[in-house]
Amino acid sequence: MAKKNLNLNKPKTFEIIFESLVFHWPFDSLFFNYFKIFRLSEPSTFLFQNKTYHYFYHKYNQTWRNERAIEIPIVKKIFNEYCEKNILEIGNVLSHYFKTGHDILDKYERGKNVINQDVVNFTSPEKYDLIVSISTIEHVGWDENPKESRKFLAMLENLKKHLTATGKIVITFPLGYNPELDKSFTQGNLGLTQAYCLKKISAFNKWQEMKCQDINLTKLHQSHHLGNIVVIGIIG
């Protein structure tokens, strides 16, 4: 089945101001509203692999405040390159922002095209040209009862079995949430063929690409700055 491109429009100034005034009420102080307005003077784009992307601002999950602002546009660009092919998403994320028609694997959420299975037990006669996962792998096993701290490795191994011969897996995740995942990544145990990292450089949620080898896990975990470094990992 043909897949539709995900349309991503540059946010309008009035939308950002409106969200700052409404979606945080009554918790936002007047200072915080000024904080949002001042941010409008900062660049609305970021660079990733020498390409320019617009930050993604949306009321769902308050993307203007977290790593979704960069994860969504990066994954969306890859997604659109495969829009006529077979796509599987791990974790129901994109459908909250766009109209989609691809398969989604999510253990808990219910919805159209959502397959409710555990990712490590997932089996399908389908082979996928693209498998994407946005800020989901860090929760696999770590937020389950009983906890299986290295379950993400079984997840990746199972997903690779569902790729076509030329298929690709794209995962994004923040460092600082799941220590076992962080350690496996920095030790090169995730089987990634390519890995890119971005770090938050501003309280206004602005980001910049960095060298992954410069990551200091000890310093990161001591600072408790969750979501200040994001990994874009590719297999295939």
Image (cartoon, grey):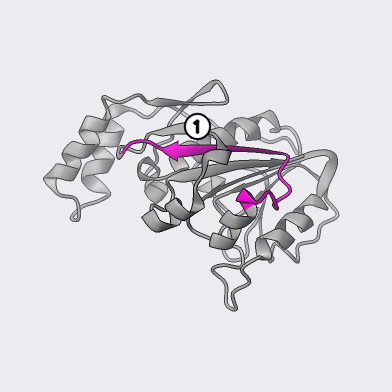
Expressed as whole percent of the image width and height from the top left, the position of residue 124 reads 81, 57
What range is drawn magenta here? Answer: 185-202
Farthest residue toward the bottom?
Answer: 146
Expressed as whole percent of the image width and height from the top left, the position of residue 74 reads 55, 34
Can residue 116 be seen from the camera position used here?
no
Above or below residue 109? Residue 214 is above
Depth check, front residue: 213 or 162 = 213
Badge 1: residue crowd in 10 Å (few <14, some 14–19, many ≥20): some
Q: Is residue 193 magenta?
A: yes
The residue at 21%/31% (across/down) is 38
Left or right, residue 202 beside residue 88 = left
Q: How many marks?
A: 1
Q: Quadrant of the N terminus?
A: top right
The residue at 42%/25% (across/down) is 45
Give, as a three-letter code, the residue at label 1. Glu
Depth check, front residue: 226 or 184 = 184
Expressed as whole percent of the image width and height from the top left, the position of residue 147 reads 59, 74
Left or right, residue 53 beside residue 75 = left
The residue at 79%/50% (across/down) is 160
Farthest residue toward the left?
Answer: 30
Can residue 104 be seen from the camera position used here?
yes
Quarter of image, res 51 = top right
Q: Please tell me whether mark 1 sits on a helix, a strand or a loop.
A: strand
Above or below residue 123? Residue 17 is above
Expressed as whole percent of the image width and height from the top left, the position of residue 140 reads 61, 63
The residue at 47%/55% (across/down) is 218
Left or right, residue 40 beside residue 209 = left
Q: Quadrant of the C terminus?
A: top right
Please give the residue where the numbered disc 1 appears in the rendered image: 209
Above or below residue 55? Residue 64 is below
